[in-house]
């Protein structure tokens, strides 16, 4: 399965957030190789849940701190992702016999979502921060 890697064009200019994003890409890569066992897929999905909770909290706090005007919409993006992830986790718990099908579709969604979210949504607050620095 094709995996997606973090590249410098995905940098939001904040080392901590960029490191978080690199970790998320690693989890997606791990999931793409997780068709080995039901337990391993569950482990990766659990890690993904914990990791996104921590990352989203850190990112949202950073946005609050800088007064990002798009915070409400960004929170909704995170909320939608968390709902999607919970649906996947509960579906996989009910139908563990389909690791290959579920694994492939989840991996494709995650790859697309992660790149889109960073390149579109996260770049909005990066651009806001840069504009605030130029104004001061």
Image (cartoon, rainbow, N blue to C red):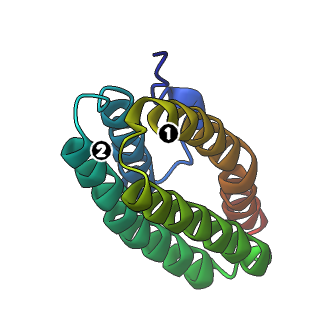
Image height check: is 105 above or below 76?
above
Counting from the top left corner in percent of width and height, residue 117 is at 67, 49
Residue 34 screen position, x and y as percent: 29, 32
Q: Nearer the viewer, residue 86 or 60?
A: 86
Q: Is residue 78 left or right of residue 90?
A: right
Which residue is drawn at the image coordinates 43% and 52% (left, top)? 95
Q: Answer few, some or many: residues within 10 Å of disc 2's Cα (few below 14, many 20 plus, some between 14 and 19).
A: many
What x and y, as percent, mark residue 46?
Answer: 30, 61
Q: In this view, does 55 lie above or below 12?
A: below
Q: Which residue is located at x 49 percent, y 39 percent?
A: 102
Q: Name the residue under label 1.
A: 102
Q: Which of marks 2 and 1 is nearer the N terminus?
A: 2
Number of numbered markers: 2
Q: In this view, does 72 lie to the left or right of 19?
A: right
Local secondary structure at mark 1: helix
Name the mark on residue 41.
2
On the rendered image, what quadrant is the N terminus found in? Answer: top left
* Neighbour tally class for label 1: few under 14, some 14-19, many 20 plus, Cα within 10 Å: some
Residue 33, image quadrant: top left
What percent of the width, then of the height, locates residue 41? Answer: 30, 44
């Amino acid at each position: 399965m094709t995996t997606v890697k973090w590249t410098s064009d995905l940098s939001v200019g904040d080392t901590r957030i960029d490191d978080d994003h690199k970790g998320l890409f690693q989890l997606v890569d791990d999931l793409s190789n997780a068709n080995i066992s039901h337990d391993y897929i569950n482990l990766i999905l659990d890690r993904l849940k914990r990791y996104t909770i921590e990352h989203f909290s850190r990112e949202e706090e950073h946005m609050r701190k800088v007064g990002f005007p798009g915070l409400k919409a960004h929170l909704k993006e995170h909320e939608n992702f968390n709902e999607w992830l919970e649906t996947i986790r509960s579906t996989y718990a009910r139908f563990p016999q389909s690791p290959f099908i579920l694994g492939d579709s989840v991996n494709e969604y995650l790859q697309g979502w992660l790149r889109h979210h960073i390149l579109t949504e996260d770049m909005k607050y990066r651009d806001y921060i840069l504009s605030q620095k130029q104004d001061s």
